[in-house]
Image (cartoon, coloured by chain):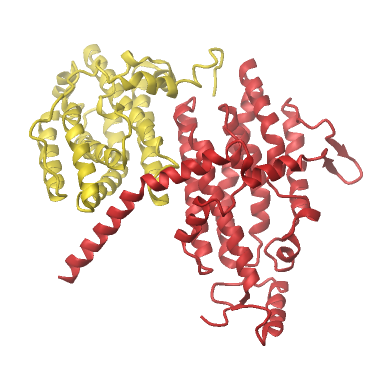
Chain colours: A red, B yellow
Amino acid sequence: MPGRYGVPTDPDYQERLAEFEARIRRGEKIEPGDWMPEEYRRQLIRMISQHAHSEVVGMLPEGAWITRAPSLKRKLILIAKVQDEAGHGQYLYHAAETLGVRREEMLEALLSGRAKYSSIFNYPTLTWADIGTIGWLVDGAAIKNQTMLAQCSYGPYSRAMVRICAEETFHHKQGKEMVLLYAHGTPKQRAMAQDAINRWWWPALMMLGPHDKDSPNTEVLVRWGIKTKTNDQVRQEFINEHAPEILAAGLSIPDPELRYDEKSGNWLHGPINWEEFWQVVGGNGPMNKERLEARRRAHAEGAWVREALQAYAARQQRAVAV
Amino acid sequence: MKPLVKDALIAKLTTLADDEVILAHRNSEWVGHGPILEEDIALANITQDELGHAILWYGLRKELDGSDPDRLAFFRDAYEYRCCELVELPKGDWAFTMLRQYLFDLYESLWLEAAQQSTYPPLAGAAQKIIREERFHLQHTRAWVERLGLGTEESNRRLQQALDFQWGYAQQLFVPIPGEELLVAEGIVPDLVPLKARWLEQASRHLQNAGLKLPINPGYQPTSREQHTEHLWSLLAEMQSTARWDPEAKVW
């Protein structure tokens, strides 16, 4: 479809860009096939595929605990949750495909280490309480981001987010319920819950992305309605909701500078260790190697299965042709 | 219900539930590691259903003796478990897992179909409730057996290997437990003899149509559910590790 994706050297670029930005300002959704700047498409593919990869890689830290869930009910809930994540991954890959990129290309980018996924999944799940904490804090942070993205200007992404948010809200609820139960449980359960909060609090804040001043993509993303809030705004919303709830449960938060500010109505946090964040994003987090290796192994071990599927499909087609 | 019949029913429900719990455990080891994303979704779905069935069977047992399903699942040791050996075997490759699930699904759907006529209404009701799910599973795993059997040389070879390994183990699904004849006489559970004939007929036909050879010598066929593979101890050690980690914990 020539002319579908515009670049600044196109003769009519400025005109079309103005039209495109006016549509966004009017709150219209951009749909597949509509004219869009190439840069808009590129940013969306980057974000949607990263998001899809995050769902797929995110299955690993939680999936590893299905076999160790402490009750039949928890086991059932956890399998359902990880299944939802696989479903979100599938849904998001499809959303990205509407921009003319194939799932195989995206997977290749993930397996080769070129594509990014959420930094949060490069931390290990060390105890069962991590499962509750991921649901409460990590999904809680993700929901803040996704609720914002549900308003985004690209139709397929926006609709995917509406659906995904509904399921994530359930994950968030069950995670919170679990951590609160342990916070009021036996001394060992309580200690386990506190330990999990200690380890996940900062990574949850970091996963919402660098400060606005250090976020190179934010400006253009906001202008084109892909993001409707900045990282710092979303992070503040997350803290304002979760900090008082954690403290009310009698658990502590590993930030000595955390305090409520009467004037702004915000919970203010201490400095974030961005050095750690960039290390993790750069591939040096505690689990980067293992996560990628697990994905590569599954892909390699599944190669003969995918070949068999193709061979079988070809055979069926020949049978029809005869 | 006569005490002997009740005891036999409790024992039978335990075997049904134990099979599902252990099979669900093995299948859940695949979640996040499947050959394609769609299969992560499908197998997670089947696994949830199997676990749901286990909860249902333990629940029926609870109505009879007041036992707590979570205590049964997480606080019994390997020698107290009554699952068959087939479900304990490590997950192997995709062919091994799909074949096992197919053989089990075919057995379970035949069993449930017959159990809908149980003279024990809670059992009949449970069977009616879950038979639909089981038919979906069977449809899914039947298709996988066909695809792998008729796919490539490699997929056929892997599936044949799995069949050679599992065929003898699968026969245990049709070995009645001690006292089961009382339940059959009362019409509470289906007689396994005609079910086995139908299972053999349907499985043989489908496997052969998928280009597989039925093993001439099926090898070891477990006969008692008091016996287990070497794998069950480690499987339970993992499965029960969190539940047993804090003896004071009342709720999870």
Residue A266: image quadrant is top right
Is there any visible trace of residue A186 in the rendered image? no
Q: Is residue A131 left or right of residue A280?
A: left
Q: Find residue A168 and report its horizontal and vertical position in percent.
A: 58, 46
| Residue ID at (78%, 54%) | A214
Q: Is residue B69 above or below residue A280?
A: above
| Residue ID at (47%, 55%) | A90
Q: Find residue B91 and report its horizontal and vertical position in percent.
A: 33, 34
Q: Is residue A20 left or right of residue A296?
A: right
User: Split into 4 quadrants, where in the image is the C terminus of chain A?
Assistant: bottom left
Is there any visible trace of residue B63 in the rendered image? yes
Residue A38: image quadrant is bottom right
B118 and A318: which is toward the camera: A318
Furthest residue toward right: A263
B84 and B126: which is toward the camera: B84
B10 and B241: which is toward the camera: B241
Query: Total number of numbered labels?
Result: 0
A320 and A296: which is toward the camera: A296
Q: Is residue A38 above or below residue A12?
A: above
Q: Is residue A117 above or below residue A152?
A: above
Q: Is residue B63 above or below residue A279?
A: above
Furthest residue toward bottom: A11
| Residue ID at (31%, 42%) | B94
Residue B89: image quadrant is top left
Q: Is residue A290 left or right of residue A25?
A: left
Q: Find residue B86 and report its horizontal and vertical position in percent.
A: 25, 28
Q: Find residue B146 and report its horizontal and vertical position in percent.
A: 21, 50
